[in-house]
Structures are given as C-alpha cells and as structure tokens.
C-alpha cells in the first residue's frame, strides 16, 4: 500500500502545525508532498522566525503553489490523502466550492473526488455563517474538519506539547500513530463495579 501524504500549509495562523506534521511523517517513513501557499510563506516567517526554505527541506517533494501540473493535482497519483495544517478560511472556501485557484486547493479537491482522506485544521475564530456552511459542505463530501483545539485533559506543559497532541490526533485519522499522543484511558478515580457475589 502506498505510504504518501500531501501536506498543505496555508496562510492561517498556526504554521507550527504543518511543520510538526512534516517532522512526524518523516519519522514515520511516510513520503510527503508539500504545498505552501504564498500567504503560508509569510506566516511561517512571521510566526516561527525561520525561512520557508528550511520548512521545505522537511518534505520529500515540494510543489510550487501555482504548479497545477504537479503530480498531486491528479487523482491517478496515489496518496493516503491530504492534510492542510493550518487551513485558512479562503482555502476552506475554495475546497468547499470546487473553485480552486492554487495547487493547494486543487490537491484537496482531488483527494475529495477520489474519496481519500482529507483533514483540514481549520483555523479561525469567531466563525461566520459562511465559514460554518463551508465546513459543512466539506464534511458532507467526506472531508474532516479538525480545528486545532488544545486537549487540556492531557495537561500540556508547553505550546509544543499542545501542537504535538493535535498533530498526532490528526495523523491518527490516516491510521498513523506517532507515539506522541496522550490517550484517554478513563478517570483514575473511577470506581470499580461492586461485586454482587454472596
């Protein structure tokens, strides 16, 4: 079975999610095809203080956002699917309507039409009715909307731990276990069933 995922990084806040996704997938031996939007480049540099070039080095293959002739623009190119981390509301809108203007959103559309896994770490708040309708449209087409909400039950001690938990749970959706997710096993104070044996 093919072990390949398309990773999109859009211009929404949260570039670290995409970076950690690339790092985890490399550790897991999954081939990555990266598409960073033009706005995503600005966000990487502003939020992380690193160059987009350094992020590109984490991927196996990098595609320019305007290269509609790239391999991941075709359904005949086998992948496990695509994750967009983070996913801006503009990217979400293009994916929801099928009116795509870049390789990032075209690749997501391909994943949907081929009935593969699409996970969008939609990053915006508060949400307008349009945002919510677009999320519903993508969900109805088989995509998964996964806002990067921190799992506070895991008692994260840093931003990095919160990000790692979210990215690990997102990769769970592709059947990939990073080994970094803190998994809920129930409350430690849960009472054991009382024996009814006489």
Image (spheres, helix red, strand yellow):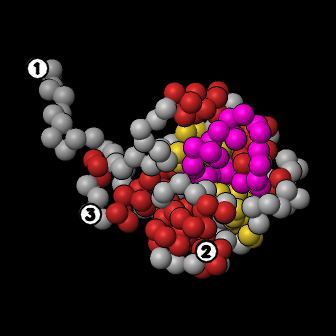
Q: Which residues are magenta?
A: 81-104
| Disc 3/disc 1 C-alpha distance (Å) | 48 Å
Residue 179 percent across, percent down from the top left: 46, 61
The quadrant the C terminus occupies is top left
Note whether residue 28 is visible.
no
Name the residue carrying label 3: 157
Residue named by callout 2: 52
Looking at the image, is mark 3 or mark 2 earlier in the sequence? 2
Q: Is residue 127 left or right of residue 136?
A: left
Camera-near label (1 vs 2) is: 2
The part of the image, by quadrant, that contains residue 93 is: top right
Q: Quadrant of the N terminus?
A: bottom right
On the question of residue 96 being in view, the answer is yes
Judge by depth and name the residue closer to the eye, 79 or 136. Answer: 136
Give the SS element for disc 2: helix
Please tell me which of labels 3 and 1 falls first in the chain: 3
**What's the residue at 27%, 47% (across, down)?**
153
Which numbered disc flags the more N-terminal residue, 1 or 2?
2
Secondary structure of the residue carrying tag 3 is loop
CB contact under 8 Å: marks 1 and 2: no
81 or 85, nearer to the observer: 85
Image position, residue 184 (x, y; %): 33, 45
Question: Of residues 198 and 193, which is closer to you in this image?
Answer: 193
Image position, residue 150 (x, y; %): 36, 50
Up-down relation of residue 17 to residue 113 (above or below): below
Q: Which residue is mark 1?
A: 198
């Amino acid at each position: 079975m093919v072990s390949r995922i398309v990773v999109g990084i859009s211009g929404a806040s949260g570039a670290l999610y995409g970076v950690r996704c690339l790092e985890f997938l490399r550790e897991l031996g999954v081939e990555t095809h990266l598409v960073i939007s033009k706005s995503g480049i600005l966000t990487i540099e502003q939020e992380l203080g690193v160059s987009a070039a350094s992020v590109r080095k984490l991927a196996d293959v990098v595609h320019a956002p305007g290269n509609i002739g790239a391999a991941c623009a075709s359904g005949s190119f086998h992948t496990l699917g695509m994750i967009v981390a983070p996913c801006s509301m503009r990217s979400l809108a293009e994916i929801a309507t099928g009116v795509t203007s870049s390789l990032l959103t075209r690749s997501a559309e391909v994943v949907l039409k081929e009935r593969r896994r699409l996970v969008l770490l939609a990053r915006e708040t508060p949400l307008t009715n349009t945002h919510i309708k677009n999320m519903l449209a993508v969900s109805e087409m088989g995509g998964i909307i996964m806002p990067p909400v921190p799992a506070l039950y895991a008692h994260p001690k840093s931003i990095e731990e919160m990000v790692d938990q979210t990215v690990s749970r997102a990769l769970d959706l592709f059947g990939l276990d990073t080994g970094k997710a803190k998994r809920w096993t129930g409350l430690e104070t849960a009472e054991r069933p009382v024996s009814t044996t006489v």
